[in-house]
Image (cartoon, rainbow, N blue to C red):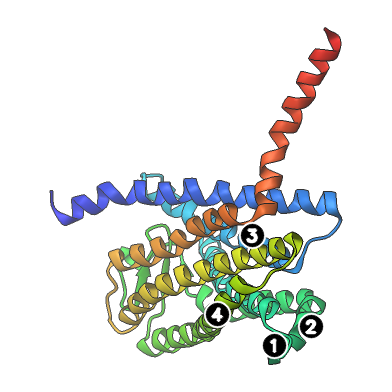
Amino acid sequence: MSPVDTRAAIRPYAFLLLSAIGIPSNLAICFAFLRALRNDRRLLTADVILCHLTFSNLMLGCTGGIPQTLHTFGYKLKFTDLDCKLIFLSFRSFRGLSISLTCLLSTYQAVVISPASSKLDTLKSQIPRFLTLTVTLLYVLYFVSCISTAIHGVANLVNNTMPPYTFNFEFCYATFYTFTALFGIGMAVMMRDLVFIVLMTIMSGYILLLFYRHSKKVKSIRSSDRAQLGARAEVKASRAVVTLVTIYVVFFGIDCVMWLYSISVVWVEPLISDIRMYFTMLYTSVCPIVIIATNPKVQTKLRVYIPERTTHSVDTLSSTV
């Protein structure tokens, strides 16, 4: 089997697998947080950030994963130029939001576990206070800055000829026409995202440093069961955040190498676009798995719905007998 045949055989099922995992799991987490909000009338700061992160991953799966998966299975998607521009705007914006919200989550977790003597201690009250404003600014930042990329989206090529500096996503194309436009926009996008990647890496390193410094102290301190339970919860949450950041840094590193190659050549191979799309979709599938596995609130809200109904029916049956 030739490399082209191998790619054609593997590609549809690879994207189908990511969509089948990512979209339902992100939907489930959104449902869990909405249920928690309905029952508790409020969400914790970390839960609000996780909810927005999950929504961003869900929209990534819908705007990128679904069209890509359908096209790889042979469905002819008849998009207009406006459709492609809106898809690119949504996909690029929510991808950036996924990066920045992961950064915000790691920053908040580092602030929460920082000692009172740390300079980060002053942010413990500031982040919850300005959380809505911060998240709103992130949405505005990415949707405005991604317009420069989205306007290059087209549904069809002139005379069905692939011009230079064009990204082929199969269902849509992004044509930049000149090397200056491609390289300038490409570097600006990469540097914008790199700021958040560097910051989240620093914060995750700080979390690991705190774990190292206090590991011996925690073993020697005798505290109440309630205090130990709270400390364990913070440690578990911090480890989950570090895991998400580690995964994102690895995936972003691969994507960054592919992106630098893409903006430095005249003709971009479709395989390169597939790999970049795949690793973006991979994070949207891995992230909810980590959240479900490590977040007790999400586990509880997803678990109690069916048992409650089952218990109710059993009690009704027992009372009838």
Q: Label 4 is placed on what type of residue?
A: Met
The residue labelled by disc 1 is 120
The residue mark sitting in front, 3 or 1, is 1
Q: Earlier in the sequence, mark 4 or mark 2?
A: 2
Q: Judge whether residue 78 can be spotted in this image.
A: no
Tag 4 and tag 2, C-beta contact below 8 Å: no
Image spot of residue 277 (x, y percent): 41, 63
264 lies above or below 219? below
Q: Label 2 is placed on what type of residue?
A: Gln
The residue labelled by disc 2 is 126
Q: Nearer the viewer, residue 259 or 243?
A: 243
Quick one: which residue is furthest to the left in this view? Answer: 1
- Mark 3: few, some, or many residues within 10 Å (few <14, many ≥20)? many
Residue at the (72%, 26%) spot, across then down? 310
209 lies above or below 35? below
Q: Earlier in the sequence, mark 4 or mark 3?
A: 3
120 lies above or below 10? below
- Mark 4: few, some, or many residues within 10 Å (few <14, many ≥20)? many
- Mark 2: few, some, or many residues within 10 Å (few <14, many ≥20)? few
Q: Earlier in the sequence, mark 2 or mark 1?
A: 1
Specify the quadrant of the image occupied by residue 319. top right
Identify the secondary structure beneath mark 2. Answer: helix
Q: Label 1 is placed on what type of residue?
A: Leu
Quick one: which residue is furthest to the top in this view? Answer: 321
Q: Earlier in the sequence, mark 3 or mark 2?
A: 3
